[in-house]
Image: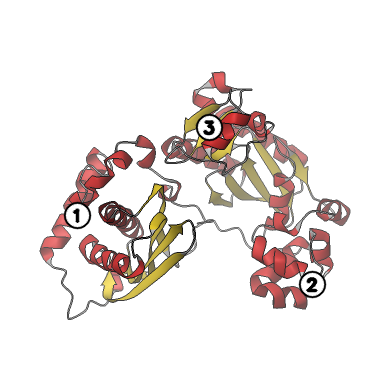
Amino acid sequence: MPAFIGHVDADSFYVSAERVRLPHLHRMPVGVLGNHGACIIAKSYEMKAFGVTTGMPIWEALPICPDGIYIKRDFTWYETLSRKMLAVVKSISPLVEYYSVDEMFFSAEHPSHDLARKLQAKVLSAVGVPVSVGIARTKILAKLASDHHKPLGCFVIGDNETRLALLHDLPVTEITGIARRSAARLASHGITTCEQFVQADRRLIRRILTKRGEDLWWELNGDSVIPIAPTRPRNKFIARGGSLGRATNDPDRLRAFVVRNTERLVEALHFYQLGCDQLILDLSFKPSGGSVSKVNLLATAWRFEEICLAALRLLEQGWASQMVHYMHVIAGGLRDRRHAQRSLFSTADRREEVIDRLKHTVNESFGRFILRSAATLPLADVYGDPANAYDICDIYGKSCF
């Protein structure tokens, strides 16, 4: 473990990225919209002051911030700046974790304000994006330090007095890895703040939140147990999907989304050179409810035809005319395809392999989805919108997902 760990986090990254190429947006209320233009996925501090929140529908944001500038997200551009930011962090540290598109952890020899300020200046100069930096003995403390000194903040935890001052009265939900359900379990034992969390008995925390919670307890107490991960951990699952935009119970449109998400899933399996032994289809219905259907495949699969047929069968099992507004196709039981055992009953043949390879080559050369299944024709609106061509999950190398 390094003596100290730093965390650099871009301030309102998607908005800051838009301001790099559109400088006139500086000091204006700016909101970045998701794939279908329905929800705010990021907002500037100026827009936040009007009461606009992340996840708010555009029709709720417009009345309270009518003069705001609303822009469709562009993950291709955000990745370009993210990679530049990653290069800057690597230039000042030998050990860096690409945690998310706008966050990185790095090793530091000393709890140095000068190092933090130097990094801020280098990122702003080379990338044009403001960042906040936290340095502490552990990853969780470093992230808390940067998160709570935004924007363009710099906070270094070099001693216990500073650590305890940061944790005092801070809700436990501010800890990475503790969301609403975990917070509710902790609250039933009288633990609602970070200070109470670190003062609680370690064995109690482990009983409530398992080993993951115990790791957080050690980290917040200043003992580093979660290492910097310079390479992405092995995938346990790979998923592709998301919102369908407007909810639908149109069978053709739903089948088209299954096929679209399967094509995206096969791309990811190809990138990681993996196959899957299990397939899961997760549907969310409107106004409420959902279904999760799964199947264990006859053999490890990675070709489009095999996976798509299985996914369409799962749609027949898990859907009965409800309005669907979210869908995810998930590959489980992942294994290196080079060592996968094929089934005696496999229907895959040389022809399918050649078609998959040709499709991949053409799309890499001429544009994603230039060649795609005809079953996706009902999604002309989706493929006609450039915002849907590239998503956050297509930015490879991040360790958080």
Which residue in the structure is indicated by mark 1? 357
Label 1 packing within 10 angstroms: few (<14), some (14-19), many (20+): few
Q: What distance separates the C-alpha of mark 1 from that of mark 3?
A: 35 Å
The kind of residue on which mark 2 rests is His
Quadrant (top left/top right/bottom left/bottom right) for the N terminus = bottom right
| Residue 112 shown left or right of residue 58 in the figure | right
Q: Residue 10: image x %, image y %?
A: 61, 39
Judge by depth and name the residue closer to the eye, 292 or 339: 292
Please, what secondary structure does the residue beneath circle 2 have? loop
If you read the primary sequence from the N terminus, does the residue marked by circle 1 or circle 3 appear first? Answer: 3
How many numbered circles does the render carry?
Answer: 3
Q: What distance separates the C-alpha of mark 3 from that of mark 2?
A: 43 Å
Q: What distance separates the C-alpha of mark 1 from that of mark 2?
A: 56 Å
Q: Compared with residue 4, is residue 332 higher up or lower down, i.e. above or below?
A: below
If you read the primary sequence from the N terminus, does the residue marked by circle 1 or circle 2 appear first? Answer: 2
Q: Are marks 1 and 3 in contact (CB under 8 Å)?
A: no
Which residue in the structure is indicated by mark 2? 189
Label 2 packing within 10 angstroms: few (<14), some (14-19), many (20+): few
Please, what secondary structure does the residue beneath circle 1 have? helix
Among all residues in the image, which is located at the extreme top?
24
Which residue in the structure is indicated by mark 3? 17
Q: Residue at x 71, y 66 (%)?
A: 184
Q: Residue at x 62, y 40 (%)?
A: 53
Among all residues in the image, which is located at the extreme bottom?
344
Q: Residue 361: image x %, image y %?
A: 21, 47
